[in-house]
Image (tube, rainbow, N blue to C red):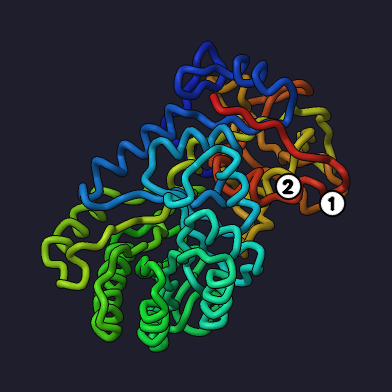
Amino acid sequence: MKPTGPIPHGFEAVDGELAAGGVGLAEMEAKAGRTPFFAYSRTLIERRIAHLRASLPDRIKINYAIKANSYAPLLEFVSGLVDGLDIASGGELEMLQQLGIDGTRISFAGPGKRDAELEAAIAAGVTLNLESENEASRALDIAERVGKTPRLAVRVNPDFELKGSGMKMGGGAKPFGVDAERVPALIRTIVDAGCEWRGLHIFTGSQALSADAIVDSQGNILELADRLAREAQVELPKLNMGGGFGIPYFHGDEPLDLDSVGEALDKRLKKLPESLTEADLFVELGRYIVGEAGVYITRIIDRKESHGQTYLVTDGGLHHQLAASGNFGTVVRRNYPVAIANRFGDEPSEEVNVVGCLCTPLDRLADQAFLPRAEVGDLVAVFCAGAYGASASPSAFLGQGPAAEVLI
């Protein structure tokens, strides 16, 4: 038997079935109209953002990184609860524009921005987090051609990283950002060109569960931002400190102690250097805001035995939940939190493998999991599905197509 991850707080059994935020499984399924589907809870998202506001210093503003989940109704809902939105492509900019979101609330990071993307962002008043001197030069040329003053910030590749993070985005050679020692000269180029100077973006890593590691990283970020501003002889109008706040996916994972992060940051902010006294200070979060608020529901279409093992074959799989299958950066495959959604109050009674419908041995949603007895027609729930599920999985693989999505 292999343990499954912890089911996020906020999901409960109502009349023996899964429910979230007062919405039961039958209502979720009726709204989706078919399986498989993702359901995202408004209530759980609101609670998470309220917890962030309560735990972090009042001065800290929150950006939502839409790459975590760009489902339009969710985007519209979250945009009303946060202070800004971060994008990483022209396609994501179009999503926000279709929702009527003001471009001045948006910042755009990511290497390899095409000229058309730069032009669209400049025209919309989006802040460009520049990833290189060449990108800065192209942005300045485009701005001059279209007659628009660009809003420019610099993404910094720091000399440190977020310890214990699942994905490191800073420290050493990286495709992201400008190496710290070259940043002051680029700042002067931007300011001297008459652009609207929008500050720094320093992102060090993601999916960290250690409060100490995040506190240490935030302290390093504030010190680096001050040093770069002093060397460039500018004040910072904005500092995006990134995020890195992780969520528990696997057995043994402990939730991030957000209160400890907030207390340490509050002490830091009381001793800010002059270069940062007027800066808008942001954390940039995606997974932490929506990850635990989502669940993936897939129907069992076959139950079979092979060499003494039981397989529950579902109509979903890795084409919707690549990360849960263990094929999205994990070295050793471990089980996400899973349950039999329509038998949510039942006691576990058998060891089973939950697999998808794809013709590949990679399509596994749970290995040797201890679950209640399930039959054809029952529904499997895979939790922690609110981030990097639908937005990061190969839904076109084998022509299966995307899952339904609903905001409940």
| Residue annotated with mark 1 | 360
Locate residue 404, reporting x and y percent.
70, 31
Nearest to the observer: residue 69 or residue 107? 107
> Going 28% across and 69% down the picture, which residue do you hit?
236
Image coordinates of residue 233 in percent, x first then y, are: 25, 82
Quadrant including the N terminus: top right
Mark 2: amino acid: Leu
Left/right placement of residue 25 relative to residue 398 reads: left
Q: Nearer the viewer, residue 318 or 161?
A: 161
Find residue 158 and report its image quarter: bottom left
Compare marks 2 and 1 and give the one earlier in the sequence.
2
Within 10 angstroms of label 2, few (less than 14), some, or many (20 or more) residues? Answer: many
- Where is residue 341? Give x, y as percent: 61, 25
Mark 2 vs 1: CB contact within 8 A: yes
As drawn, 289 above or below 408? below
Quote the CA–CA distance across marks 2 and 1.
Answer: 10 Å
| Tag 1 secondary structure | loop
